[in-house]
Amino acid sequence: MHVPIKVDYGVRALVDLAMYGSDGNSLRSFDISQRTAIPNAYLAQVLNSLKKAGFVKSTRGPNGGHQLAVDPDTIHLSSIMEVLDGTNNLVNCLDDDNFCVHSPACAQKELWRTVEEAIHGVLFSITVSDLARKTQFIKLQI
């Protein structure tokens, strides 16, 4: 499975907002970009998608910036993946039976569905808050 860079950047941005914006302060895109090494132009696209999904709120102007719009405990990695990458099936036939000439007599289809459900379960079990805590712990160890 390949995690698209847009998803990686989205997770990094949300974790940064959870860690540094938890006091209600808005964070500037430039500062998020510097801490996360996400190119500023790409960060703007990612934050816009996360804003449309209701995870982030943004304000313009000299005192503007970005904040989490919801509790980081409620943002699951599976939701971020869905927002930034769509369905993201491991194999195309899981969405469309007509995609494969072997369907419905394919022995692999259920295998890939089981693998996909396991991955989704793991991603659903991890929240932005979990990753923020882990990141803070790792930084203390360095």
Image: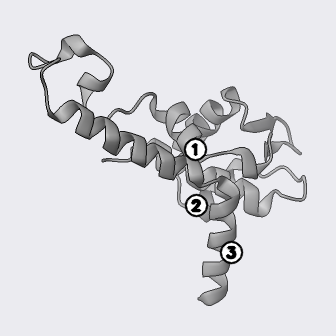
Amino acid on which the number 1 mark rests in the picture: Leu
Q: Which mark is residue 136?
A: 3
The mark tally for this picture is 3
What residue is shown at x 74% (from left), y 57% (from top)? 18
Q: Is residue 131 visible?
A: yes
Would you call the spot at circle 1 few (<14 residues within 10 Å), some (14-19), or many (20 or more)? many
**The disc labelled 2 sits on which kind of residue?**
Thr
Residue placed at 41% from the left, 48% from the top? 119
33 left or right of 115?
right
**Rendering colour mode:** one colour
| Sequence-wise first label, 3 or 1 | 1
Locate residue 31 relative to residue 71 in the image: left or right. left
Q: Position of residue 115 (x, y in %)?
A: 32, 45
- Classify residue 65 by image quadrant: top right
Using the rendered image of the protein, determine whether residue 31 is visible from the camera's viewpoint.
Answer: no
Counting residues from the start of the chain, the first of labels 1 and 2 encountered is: 2
Residue 62 horizontal/vertical position (percent): 87, 43
Compared to 100, does 21 lie above or below? below
Q: Which mark is residue 36?
A: 2
Q: Residue at x 32, y 47 (%)?
A: 2
- Residue type highlighted by circle 3: Gln
Instruction: Give the numbered dot on residue 43.
Output: 1
The Cα atoms of the two marked residues, 3 and 1, are separated by 22 Å
Query: For the residues carrying marks 3 and 2, which lies nearer the camera in this image?
Result: 3
3D distance between C-alphas at marks 1 and 2: 10 Å
Q: Earlier in the sequence, mark 3 or mark 2?
A: 2
Quick check: 130 above or below 40?
below
Asked whether 54 or 102 is in front, the reply is 102
Q: In whole angstroms, how far apart are the C-alphas of marks 3 and 2?
A: 14 Å
Is the C-beta separation of discs 1 and 2 under 8 Å? yes
